[in-house]
Image: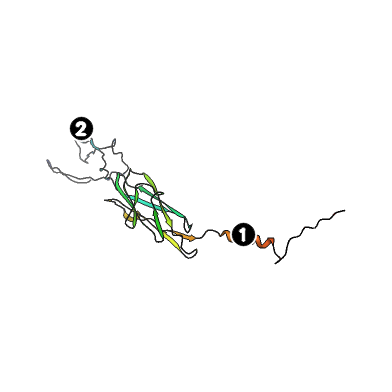
Amino acid sequence: NNFNLASGESKVFNVTFTVPAVANCTAGTIQNTATVSASSTDPNAANNTSAVASTPVSCPPVVPTTDVSITKSGPPAIHRGNTIRYTVVVKNEGSAVANNVTVTDPVPANVTFNQALTDAPCTLQSASVVCSGITLQPGESKLYMIAFEVNGALACQGVTLQNSATVTLAGDTNTANNQSAVVTSAVTCPASSSSSSSSSSSSSSSVPGAIGCIDVLKE
């Protein structure tokens, strides 16, 4: 404001606004006009207001993202010689379909893979259980059970099984969630039946060498 124009002179002014990020992407329109006035007498006020400038609001295209995550759970303790089952859950955290997702689960020490109790498509490949060819829609999760047989000759105390799994997807934009936490399971032994039977036998004959007798009284 407060500028001068000589007869026939014109000036250009650029006015900038910021469009809110919450503006409607499909039905929003920005309309704007401007007016001019002067301290001197204007003999023609009909051209003192501009036409309405209408600008439709559009949104930048959404770029699909690819992001898969994995979690794993298992028992805190397991008897030696028993079957240990781990649950693996993979999820598509992105906005694009995740094709050819692969889960890799290295076989822990002191166990052997049990294919019969493991969900398809998981199979043993070298020293790892691999679940390949998984397809996940955006937001979809899938659960897989992976089973191992625990070595029956392990010590009853001081031995633990540790296991984790990874998930891979070509073009994953977030690899921070591609490794599960380590599941630790303590190896234990089932309670011995000999201890209970010995205690019951000792209580029935607490006196060494004693022979049980029954007194019969007759009147």
Find numbered disc 1 in the image and state the secondary structure of the residue it sits on: helix
* Left or right placement of residue 208 versus residue 52 in this view: right
- Would you say residue 159 is visible in this rendering? yes
Mark drawn on residue 37:
none
Q: Position of residue 187 (x, y in %)?
A: 47, 60
How many numbered dots are placed on residues in this image? 2
At 34% from the left and 56% from the top, the residue drawn is 128
| Amino acid, disc 1 | Ser
Q: Which residue is mark 2?
A: 46
Q: Nearer the viewer, mark 2 or mark 1?
A: 1
Looking at this rendering, what residue extends furthest in the bottom direction? 208
Check disc 2 and report its element: helix, strand or loop. Answer: helix
Residue situated in front as seen by the camera: 149 or 216: 216
Whether residue 12 sits left or right of residue 67 in the image: it is left
> Mark 1 — residue?
197
Residue 186, placed above or below residue 23: below
Q: Amino acid at mark 2?
A: Ala
